């Protein structure tokens, strides 16, 4: 048990694993998660929120552990029937998962805030940490490729991250409004942790909401990022490829460059120890430790080490 107020910025599978790690730690009671909504897209007339649902299912122990997304004990009869009817079914949505999307879509039509819909779903599935949204407005990540613009799900799922990424845009972010809940949580935080998520399309999308990054920069929180890279490669997802496409280095330096205006510390894997001198030169505190998270114990151990390290360094800075 700790009275430290913690905020986790999380997207994708790496973000969900970090959230599970905090939920299993002694720091769970005062931790909240801000998730990525910019992967959201409409499929078969239903509004699907992949990153948020991965958080909910993971924190509620409803996730398919083998795949890292979707519901466990899933079936796909509805999708199979849609395919026979000639519909595109490249976005894999299981029967149980579709219930979530039907429910979300109905509430959206009724004008219920997206934040409140998440709260209802999190309660239904027993999510062990509160999940906040950066905005209730629609923000969607778009990826420009040599063949034109794609939604992130088209790029990630349908095209399997194969096209070259020329640029990334967060459609709607310029007119989005940050939720009061997210801004309040950031303002009162003692520690803000950036999960080992894609810095461009997961964390970058959260920061693209006007007011979110400024709130982090203006807060008194100690800000620590866990690198999603191990020896210059991602465990899962296209973060390394997208960093290279954006002209950033596929190592700890590239991760730092995305967060440089507010970062106090980084957690990097043992395989990236060679980046330590450069990161120290930037004025960062750095924890070098194994970062691969396979089991519940791995997740809890990494996040506990990260928080313990941040607390120690935060106290040293204040002394």
Image (cartoon, rainbow, N blue to C red):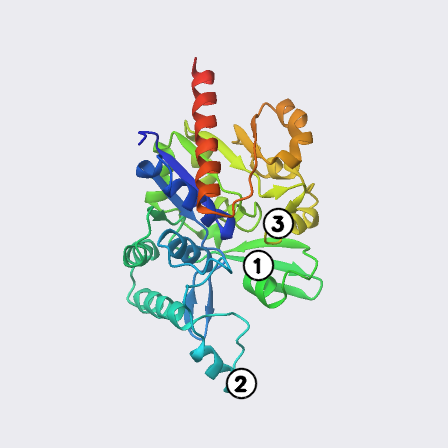
**Which label sits on residue 86?**
2
Measure the C-alpha gap from mark 1 to mark 3.
15 Å
Q: Is residue 23 visible?
A: yes
Mark toward the start of the polypeptide (2 vs 3): 2
The residue furthest bottom is 85
Query: SS for tag 2?
Result: loop
State the residue at coordinates (62%, 53%): 238
Crowdedness near tag 1: few (<14), some (14–19) or many (≥20) residues, C-alpha within 10 Å: many
Q: Where 104 sits versus 84, above or below?
A: above
What residue lies at 68% left-to-right and 55% top-to-bottom? 166
Looking at the image, is mark 1 or mark 3 earlier in the sequence?
1
Mark 2 / mark 1, whichever is N-terminal: 2
What is the distance, in whole Å, between disc 2 and disc 3 at their CAs?
A: 33 Å
* Residue 289, picture quadrant: top right
Of residues 150 and 199, the one drawn nearer to the viewer in this rendering? 199
In depth, the one of 56 and 176 nearer the eye is 56
């Amino acid at each position: 048990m700790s009275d430290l107020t913690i905020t986790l910025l999380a997207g994708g599978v790496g973000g969900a694993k970090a959230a599970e790690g905090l939920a299993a730690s002694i720091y769970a009671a005062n931790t909240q998660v801000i998730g990525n909504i910019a992967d959201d897209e409409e499929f078969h007339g239903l509004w699907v929120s992949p990153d948020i649902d991965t958080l909910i299912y993971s924190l509620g122990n409803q996730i398919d552990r083998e795949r890292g997304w979707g519901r466990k004990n899933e079936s796909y009869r509805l999708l199979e029937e849609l395919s026979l009817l000639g519909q595109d079914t490249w976005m894999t949505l299981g029967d149980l998962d579709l219930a979530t999307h039907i429910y979300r879509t109905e509430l959206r039509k009724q004008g219920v805030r997206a934040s409140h819909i998440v709260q209802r779903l999190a309660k239904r599935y027993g999510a062990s940490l509160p999940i906040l949204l950066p905005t209730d407005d629609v923000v969607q990540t778009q990826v420009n490729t040599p063949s034109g613009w794609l939604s992130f799900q088209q790029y990630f799922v349908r095209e399997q991250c194969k096209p070259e990424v020329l640029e990334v845009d967060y459609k709607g972010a310029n007119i989005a409004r940050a939720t009061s809940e997210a801004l309040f949580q950031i303002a009162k935080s003692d520690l803000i942790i950036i999960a080992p998520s894609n810095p461009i399309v997961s964390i970058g999308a959260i920061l693209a909401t006007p007011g979110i990054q400024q709130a982090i920069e203006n807060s008194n929180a100690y800000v620590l990022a866990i690198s999603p890279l191990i020896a210059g490669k991602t465990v899962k997802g296209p973060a390394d490829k997208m960093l290279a496409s954006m002209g950033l280095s596929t190592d700890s330096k590239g991760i730092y460059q995305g967060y440089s205006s507010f970062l106090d510390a980084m957690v990097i894997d043992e395989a990236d120890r060679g980046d330590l001198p450069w990161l120290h030169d930037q004025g960062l505190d750095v924890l070098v430790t194994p970062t691969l998270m396979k089991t519940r114990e791995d997740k809890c151990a990494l996040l506990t080490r990260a928080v313990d390290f941040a607390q120690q360094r935060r106290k040293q800075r204040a002394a």
